[in-house]
Amino acid sequence: MRSIWNGAISFGLVSIPVKLVNATESHAVSFRQIHTEDGGRIRYRKVCELEDREVAQDEIGKAYEDADGSMIPITDEDLSHLPIPTARTIEIVAFVPEERIDPLQMGSAYYLAASGAPAAKPYTLLREALGRSNRVAIAKFALRGRERLGMLRVVGDAIAMHGLLWPDEVRAPEGVAPDAGVTVRDQELDLADALMDTLGEIDLDDLHDEYREALEQVIAAKAAGETPPEAREEAAPGKVLDLMAALESSVRAARESRRGEGAGPAEDAEVRTLPQRTPSRRTPKESGGKKSTSTAARKTAAKKAEAKKSAAKGPQGEKTEGKRTAAKETEAKKSTASAAGKSTAESARPGKRTAAKNAAKKTTGKSAPARSTAKSTAKKTPPRKRSA
């Protein structure tokens, strides 16, 4: 790999000669601009706007544009006299835990390669020290005309350096979060956890750029004079679902996908927040032993119905209630008389059965007037008022 910078790591009084190598590369497909009528290349030429002519590269310099639009020329000699002690040095200034570094600060990544045999021993010493301490080194270095901040960490058997943004270059997340207060229920969090557990982990090496692959297929087909492959039809917008339904569907689809059942593409759902609902019967009771809402509601309804019945009773209702009470008393007297007759018949001798029968007939005969008397008594008896 070609180095883009040569210098040394300053580790206290130890100096480690290193070369800076890009740790990443771009596989993006690039395009050229052309004239659509004849396919000619569109090129940009550097033209001086005062002389209205194209200028060569050796005639081009740097300048700073002031607020009033005037240009202040800056030469390479001016830049060479800047007080940058890290022009050719990666100066380590601190060692901190890796979690102290905000990922928002991370930029380009580089590998630091030992430059020559004398750098092997101090390079290995720094690598082992970083690995054993579980910390990263914070350093300053200069690259492409400006001082930068970096983080050194161990990657395999090498030391990698990540370019960091200065803390004042990271914006605060103001105005990004939702303004309105949103409450997330425990059931929704449980489903979200279940979805994360179902999706599980993945080997990042299995991920690839599908867009770039499709673009390369189109380019290959055009180069061969063939018809480019057609794009897959996008799924139609799904029905509007609430958050719980969307989470449940996601968990179900993820489980089927993990089982390899080959489920069809899931419909895209527009997610909206659920309104507050009353707890259902399936909600477990609280440990305090409180009655459920449905039981309390039934009792309240029963009390209201009883109160309505009592209120509906007027003088006519009180008379009806008195008649019922008198009828119950008469029925009790009849039961007592019948029991007494049976007892007399059982206690009589066999020779006096006829007399017992006659006595029973007389008793029965007398009971008829008693019934009429009871009825008249029931009519004369004033009705009893029943409390509500």
Image (spheres, rainbow, N blue to C red):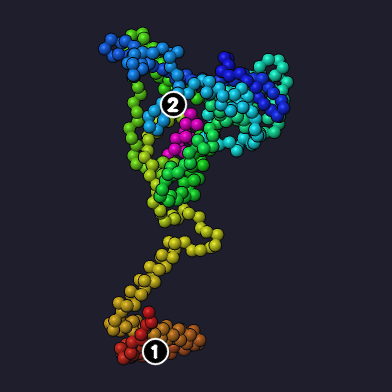
* Vertical relation: 314 (above or below) 189: below
Residue 110, picture quadrant: top right
Toward the left, the furthest residue is 37
Residue 129, picture quadrant: top right
* Vertical relation: 269 (above or below) 64: below
Residue closer to the observer: 378 or 387: 387
Which residue is pictured at 36% across the width and 73% down the height? 306
Rendered location of residue 309, percent (x, y): 33, 75
Residue closer to the observer: 119 or 338: 119
Which residue is pictured at 36% across the width and 13% down the height? 54
Q: Which residues are magenta?
A: 249-260
Residue 243 can be seen, yes or no:
yes
Say the numbered circle drawn on residue 363.
1
* Vertical relation: 205 (above or below) 365: above
Q: Is residue 28 left or right of residue 136?
A: left
Say the numbered circle drawn on residue 281.
none
* Vertical relation: 272 (above or below) 295: above
Q: Amino acid at mark 2?
A: Ile
Q: Which quadrant is the C terminus positioned in?
A: bottom left
Q: Which residue is identified by label 2?
A: 72
Q: Amino acid at mark 1?
A: Thr
Q: Secondary structure at mark 1?
A: helix
